[in-house]
Image: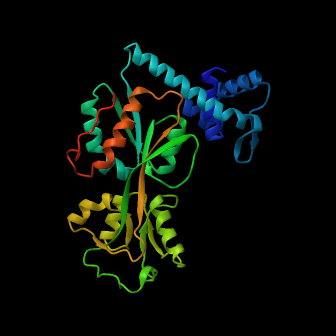
Amino acid sequence: MHPRLLKTFLAVTRHRNVTRAAEAVHLAQSSVSDQIQALEAELGTPLFTRSRSGLQLTAAGAALQPYAEEILMLTDEARGAVAVTAGQERGAVSIGALETIAATRLPAWLSRFGQAHPEIALRLSVAGTNDLLRKLGDGEVDVAFCFDKGEADERFARRSISREPLILIAPPGEPPLPADQGLSALAARRFVVTEAGCVYRHLFDAAFAAAGLAAPKLAAEAGSIGAIARLVAAGTGLGLVPRLAVAEALERGEVTELSWPGALQAADLVMIWRRRRVQPPALKQLLASASTGLGALRPGDARLRHAEPIPS
């Protein structure tokens, strides 16, 4: 099974459409069809069936998928390890992160890491949690920084970096909430929230469900915490957001913080990486650095509180 055929097979698996798969792997549609047919002929069984919703994996195709992913990952790792050892290429790490984390928690730490390891090339991409996990599974990123949604996946290892508080924000001048009414004081209010599937939205919905209350009406949904802060500042509604994402807006007086009338809400910031037989040296160094240094570095800090050990 040539890696080229497996790459095309996974593209068709992901897109369930030959046209979109061809665009993803930069081939003509006829070439994609020929490669899938060649792989099916080699294995002696169909890998896809057609349905109204697109191409679907057969039982044989579903059995092949995890092996194809593993083979391609090991092939890439082997090429990279040989290139680094032969001096043809320096180490590289692709990092994926939520916008909030990329803007507030990573810059100072990545700067320090880059100064300590100038031989390692760093690439940073920003995406939502679900997209980050997909990119991690497909090998598009080596490590992802996001908030834990509590969903186990045996393909991935994860490590908690910090526990980040979520706070209730309101427009400037908003009066305090009645202290004796609990979450019911918010039941009639309107909220600006993140999209369904986001950990902040999950915590928001779960808090009211645990109190036996229906979630408040939504004024708007937004995919950006920055957009939520601006909508709240304009009086659109209240918001439940990570403190780290709105620290500067609070300091400027654009929004105000209200006491959350319930159990303190917080989200676990985690780094997630794919389990491998052999960990690339550059990624191993970055994971060690994040474990010892990133948790101690707060947004806006120029230096770590304690010296960061450099992994050997």
Residue at the spot 57% in from the left edge and 40% down from the top edge: 155
Where does the N terminus fall, quadrant-wise?
A: top right
Left or right: residue 35 compared with residue 295? right
Residue at image location 41% in from the left, 32% down from the top: 283
Q: Which quadrant is the C terminus positioned in?
A: top left
Q: Is residue 248 left or right of residue 134?
A: left
Q: Residue at x 44, y 79 (%)?
A: 183
Nearest the viewer among 228 and 207 is 207
Given residues 128 and 143, the one toward you in this image is 143
Horizontal and vertical percent for residue 107? 28, 44
Outermost top residue:
86
Up the image or down, 243 lies above or below 46; here it is below
The residue at 37%/50% (across/down) is 99
Image spot of residue 10 (x, y percent):
62, 33
| Quarter holding residue 229 | bottom left
Q: How is the image coloured?
A: rainbow
The residue sitting at the right extreme is 44
Residue 4 in the image: above or below residue 255: above
Using the image, determine if residue 180 lies above or below residue 111: below
